[in-house]
Image: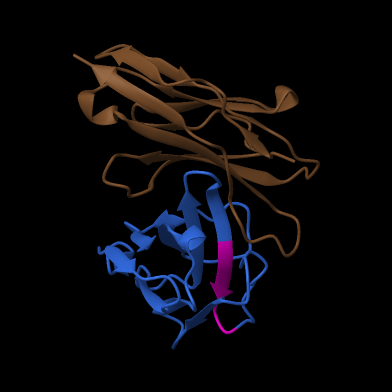
Amino acid sequence: AQKITQTQPGMFVQEKEAVTLDCTYDTSDPSYGLFWYKQPSSGEMIFLIYQGSYDQQNATEGRYSLNFQKARKSANLVISASQLGDSAMYFCAMREAVAGNNRLAFGKGNQVVVIP
Amino acid sequence: GAGVSQSPSNKVTEKGKDVELRCDPISGHTALYWYRQSLGQGLEFLIYFQGNSAPDKSGLPSDRFSAERTGGSVSTLTIQRTQQEDSAVYLCASSPRGGRATDTQYFGPGTRLTVL
């Protein structure tokens, strides 16, 4: 079963506008971590932001913030004031804390193109 | 400091040949991960190393795949008798510790493998 779902089609965003990328997840484990990564055309996977399942506050890192709705099992990424360099694929990932699990489960990704 | 490095960045090989991919993790990181990224399958976990513990090989797709980590640092992923379906980008990641849902994994630039 798919643990991470990212279903939005490719998105075009105007420079300086905000964009929200949707991510829903599926787990029965009460303890887990959620991560967002950016993958530009160069191919490197760049860590952006982390949210723990027990965190009371939504995570923020500069222009990135996470809209974490635990009951709905969603962890949407918000990028404020988009820049041309934000054009990339964005991946949502989860790691469950169950013993013996050492892997990140990734979604299929969201393509973002920022236009001037 | 230096990030995760991988070599080669690109590898083209003929079907049936063996290949070795190298990963050099961030200095001081005890946990190391290999993933594979292909168009059809997205990002898949392959193997995990943590210190001197036995590796988690649960993601390796067949016995043609193997990996080792020498001296708790550099890792080599070996694919024997390569097949065309092995064509993918192979990503290595490391984290300061392992075994916890909060561990952020930092990725290298990947090795693009093409099997002709």
Q: Which x, y percent locates residue A61?
A: 39, 34
Q: Which x, y percent locates residue B71?
A: 44, 88
Q: Is residue B48 left or right of residue A98?
A: left
Query: Image height check: is B48 above or below B68?
Result: above
Task: Write down the region rendered in magenta.
Answer: B46-52
User: B62 or A29: which is nearer to us?
Assistant: B62
Residue at point 57%, 24% (across, down):
A7
Residue at point 43%, 59% (across, down):
B87
Q: Quarter-wise, where is residue A79 in the image?
A: top left
Chain letter, colour blue in render: B
Q: Quadrant of the C terminus of chain A?
A: top left
Q: Is residue B33 magenta?
A: no
Q: Is residue B2 left or right of residue A100?
A: left
Main secondary structure type of the part rendered in magenta: strand
The colour with which the image depicts chain A is brown
The mark total stands at 0
User: A82 or B67: which is nearer to us?
Assistant: B67
Residue at point 72%, 22% (across, down):
A72
Q: Is residue A28 left or right of residue B90?
A: right
Q: Which x, y percent locates residue A12?
A: 34, 15
